[in-house]
Amino acid sequence: MAVCIAVIAKENYPLYIRSVPTQNELKFHYTVHTSLDVVEEKISAVGKSIGDQRELYLGLLYPTEDYKVYGYVTNSKVKFVIVVDSSNTSLRDNEIRSMFRKLHNSFTDVMCNPFHNPGDSIQSKAFDGIVSGMMVQTG
Amino acid sequence: IRDPNNQVQVVKNLRICVNKVVLSCQPQEGAVTNVMTTGDYELNFSATTPWFEAYRENFLQSMPAADHEFLNHYLACLLVVSSTEAVPVEQFLKLSQEQHRIQHSGEYTNPKWFIPNTLKYYVLLHDTSEGDEQRADAVYEDMKQRYGPQGCYLLKMNSRTFSAEKDEQIPDPWSQYLHKNILRNQVSTVTLSKCTGRSLSSDVNCSARDPDVLVVGAGSHGACLTLNDHDHIRQFVQEFTFRGLLPHLEKNIRQLNDQLVSRKGLSRSLFTATKKWFGGGKVPEKNISEPKSTCGLLYPPEAPELQIRKMADLCFLVQHYELAYSCYHTAKKDFLSDQAMLYAAGALEMAAVSAFLQGGAPRPYPAHYMDTAIQTYKDVCKNMVLAERCALLSAEILKSQGKYSDAATLLIKMTSEDSDLRSALLLEQAAHCFINMRNPMVRKFAFHMILAGHRFSKAGQRRHALRCYCQAMQVYKDRGWSLAEDHINFTIGRQSFTLRQPDNAVIAFRQILINDSRQTATQQGAFLREYLYVYKSVIGASDISLPQLPLPCINSSATRVYFGHERRLAEGEKQAATHVSLDQEYDQDSSAMWCHLEEQLVASVNRGIVPANFQPTQYCLNNQTDNLRHPLAVVEEPIIVEVTFKNPLKVSLALSNLSLLWKFSSDGTSSSKETKTEDLTEETITNEETTAVGVGNVGHQTLDLMVVRGRQNLKILGPRLNLTKEDKMLIRHGPDRRLDPIITPPMPLMEVFFLQFPTALLCGEIRKAYVEFCNVSGVALCGLRVASTHPDFFTFGSQATTPLTPISPNSAENCSAYKTLATALQPGSVASEVLVSADDFSQPSGVIEIPIDGNTLQSGESTQLPLWLRGPDEEGVHEINFLFYYESTEKGLKISHRVLRHTVFICASRSLSVQASACRSSVPPHHCLDDKGSGGTLVFVDVENINTSEGGVREFHIVQVSSSSQHWRLHKYINPDKDKGLSGIMGHLCFISSWFISISKYSLLSTSDAVEKYTFADLNLGNERIISSSTPCGDFFFRSSSRTSSIGKSQGSLPTEDRGSDITNIVKKCNELDLNIIIIWKAYVVEDNKQLILEGQLHVALQTIGKEASSLTPKEEAQEMVLLKFKSELPPPVVLPCAELSQLIKTNLHYPETYTHPFVQDSLCLVPVTLTLSNCSLAQVDVIIDLKHKSSSPESLEVHSSFAWVGQTQYKLQLKPQEVLGLSLQACFLRAGVYNLNTPQVFAKPSEQSAMCETSQQTASPALIIINNTCDACWPADRTT
């Protein structure tokens, strides 16, 4: 379902990026990077209204011709971005939401690893497995 | 001749410009830039985009006039005739006709005319510098009559002569119009430029701008115009506008309005009626008959709908926006209802513009009008040019309203595949929109900049492309988006290279290579190739200085600097000192150890004081050593620099012809280096070593890399400081002077070789080896010393006792390490004694001065010395470090001394274990040969073979037992199993043999002697005597005893202080025994089918009587002793343990062993017995002797009964310190038999002690006396056991 999944640190550098068509990795990097603008916009918009309990899921960030970009921000301002093929119409908002939740759980596990240095790129195999699971699922 | 239609030319010129302008308006260097800080992004971009505005301008100007709108149709025509013309009036006529012909003949599609009867304005141009003024006036008058005063004008101006002053006074009047796009408010420019694009009618709100005049002042841009002329022109334009154009327009508007109003009612009803009636059929028919290409209706030029549009345009031109808007609005409605989409879109567009321009608008800006218009243009009409115009207008309007995101989406939507240039420009504008938003979207800006750059490069606009990429780079740089960064860098590199900026290209490519790339190997290879290509071309251009190479990375902090020659490790059978080499890893502990040794050495040289400026010598500098000082290097000695290269790429790099560049400054703070080259084709980290040659040849070497040459600076960043608070908060680095050595004058250089140096020894084994000192430098050295971590491991022999050993090792092959004397004495004979002063052997603080001849070693000289080694007492592998110290014979040099390190590993295996214990002998005095002694002590020595290696050692022979003590000496050797003799001592595995060796106290030498003297007593078991006091044996004895005694002292002092009472002191004193026993053994070892004889010695230190001491693990035993003492400390001092106090007095019974008495004659047998009491302590002791004391034990009772003491049975005596007292007793026997005489009870206490703590003294072994009857023996009956 997803063609690209990215985890971006609070300081906006990538912690993890994986995309399915590897030959076009650069494009996805650009896409994800650009989406951060929208993420920040959304965060600042939300932050103004009610401070504490905000929705982590940001929804569709923006559509491009071929892809839809979804965003999710953890409470520690780590951003998750999932890029989905536009042609894949079967994907509902709820499914994206659950994908993000799964991603978040796995990310939390990674962070709980005492040997993981926060701020380093994610090397965890378990996390990798979760991500590839999400990518393969569509086929 | 001026052409009245010169507008056409202008338009054409401008159209040609379209392509040029973009190129000509390159971003100016150092132009107005806007530094913008958004969050953590600092962006530097140009606020204005002149090229875009120029593009927009030209685009709008070059728009062809369309049928459906009239804004760029011509309103009026200026007919200009020069006054120099022969018949100006005729010319006017001609021009007028021509104009008419152009407008109405239909030959020309361009220009289009607004209204059929175009306003003609006749201008007579008169050049004031030449020509006849009167004639001009006359012609003008004629014109006035003919065309009316409103329709003509006489323009006088100067066109030929240059007046110098006006150049200075007037700024180029055209300049502001030529570059107006830069100076003007953007929105107004749009409208104004629309006006200018449109013939003469345009100059409604700006005075002197007229395309016509461009022709007049052509070329020099009005350089010839005087101030007056400007006024004239201004007047003329005013005249033209107010007299001619405006009234004409007013008239037209009124006309059109009237037409419309009059027609309105009719036409409306008519149209609606027809629609109602024919609506069903009419509309579809239209759709069929006029297919999509025309996009709806085509109105004839006179159609009423078009009249409305025309009027709206006129109103728009005269800035009557409100009316214009309503007109456009109605027009739009009409067009829409007629499905004339093109017209409708035009009307929509203009309605939106006029609504915007209305200012202080009563109605909000209808943005959707624009969107619809664009949509219509694009989709329905397929007219991209119009769509673009509309989009540009709309974007500008939106921008001015601050709706940047809308503007950006609009612009992005307009990008398409067909025109790269347009797309690039639009994308760039969109990017600027993103950055100008209230919450600037930096990343979108960057992304669109990249897109724009891409399109620019596709369109061939390299310069623009490069600029775009560079701006985008600001966002991506150093933020971990390496893939994107690499891509941008790569593009920048390529673009800069094609733009002939190879330096920038190199920098960009470098960046890619330096970054930790995540690219694939092939990609990296491509990058590398590209880089090398560019790099080569740069090198080709300038070969003065070599540029920096990015690859391979130098791990600068891992650089190691080594001072000195590469060592030869072995030379024949000589084994060189290990010293320091680059192969060794740096180890904190070992370096501290070396430093400590060096400190010891320096201290011993400087009479025990370490100088304040002492710095340990460092031969190899790395990132862990102390690099704050400048290292010292000796002249003509090499400096080796080891550089660690790292190849971060997945592509392998081949390095060749590496050389080290160096700089030498004459004040002596640098050195010279030269290089050895090595070829490497390794992919990963490769270490390259470089050697150095002496100072002097200041050459210029280069570093070659693959096909390119380049260099890398070796700059070492010091360690991060972390001492003060400031250091902790900032990142500061300390200095690192590893690579800045100071060259000093020549120093001696010594090499040390070892010969016959073993690697494995038995514990305690003595081996002789040779050491060779070799001065390889040109300077003499002296003060040779050595310090070691194991000073008891080796000895050079002491001068006083050194025997004359052969200097050359060859002759000593089979010789024993010991000095021996052949003796014919029987085994077990009396020991020979030698008295030796301890000073001869002692060495202070583990530093040993090496006895070389004359204490100096001249240059080139070498000397060999014997060296004795003794295997460590503990088994296992021992690391033994030697530090040789030497100094130059010259004093006052920068380097005070030099050192040489050597490390050996000795594997020690177990040999023998010797256990010795001493106990008081109760041997009767006549057994003692030495009557002077107060008493002897028996020493039991148990020797056990604990060697476990099956193959090696066959057997051990104990060759000799020697003693060494200040007070004691070995006296005699008693073996209980006489018949076993020597062979019995042969230790097979776990064979234990014991001797009893009597020792006697050596009373002659008292402690009052100032000099500590040791008596060596040798008790040889074979037929040669080893002089234990001489070199190897004595040396090792003192070495090891100094170590153990120091341990003993420190532990022994503790309890005495704690007690406070001197009882224990006294008690202990009398139990003290400082006897050291040296066991010298020989081992027969089979090795390679050859029998070898190894020799060795073991030391046992006996300190207390009754305690067992062992040669093994002396330390552990020492600890046990401590524990025991602490236990004895626990009971209060009053109740002293009997065991200790019982040692105070030594008793001996002297009596005849057998006594024959005729019991038949005399039934009472009286035997005189002498009880000798000797006070062992140094205090007065009260003694009570009770002969009749009843012991509780029944056994003794039994013996008791058989004899009785006669005479005084109780004595009370006081014994002075060390007094020996004989007491005559008499025993009375009744029968013959064997009796135990040892029944007297002796109680003793130190006399100062107030409390009674009398203790019964020990009852030694039974003293048996045999009483024989003279005639018949009846002894078996009474024999007791």
Image: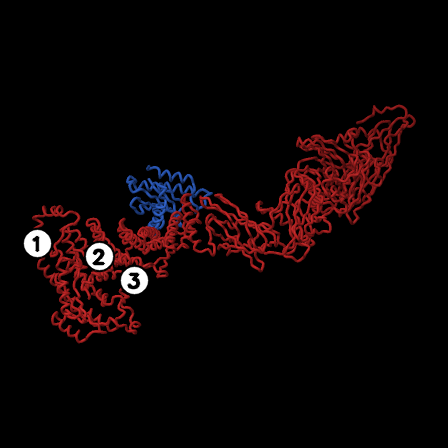
Above-or-below relation of B1203 to B451: above
Colour of the chain lettered B = red
For image coordinates 37% across by 61% down, the residue present is: B30
How crowded pointer 1 is (Cα within 10 Å; few <14, some 14-19, many 20+) is rated as: few
The residue carrying mark 3 is B182
Above-or-below relation of B490 to B192: above
Q: Say which chain tag 2 marks.
A: B
Q: Earlier in the sequence, mark 3 or mark 2?
A: 2
| In-front residue for pair B969/B599 | B599
Q: CA distance from mark 3 to mark 2?
A: 21 Å
The label on residue B269 is: 1
The residue carrying mark 2 is B63
Front of the two marks 2 and 1: 2
| Label 3 secondary element | helix
**Is B880 on the left-hand or right-hand side of B78?**
right
| In-front residue for pair B694/A123 | B694
Name the residue type under label 3. Answer: Ile
- Image quarter (top left, top right, bottom left or bottom right) of the N terminus of chain B: bottom left
Colour of the chain lettered A = blue
The label on residue B409 is: none
Using the rendered view, name the quadrant where residue B1185 is placed. top right
Q: Earlier in the sequence, mark 2 or mark 1?
A: 2
| Label 2 secondary element | loop
- Image quarter (top left, top right, bottom left or bottom right) of the C terminus of chain B: top right
Name the residue type under label 1. Answer: Ser
Location of residue B565 in the rendering, given as x and y in whole percent from the top left corner: 60, 49
Location of residue B1070 in the rendering, given as x and y in whole percent from the top left corner: 77, 42
Front of the two marks 3 and 2: 2
Q: Say which chain tag 3 marks.
A: B
Mark 2 in CB contact with mark 1 (< 8 angstroms): no
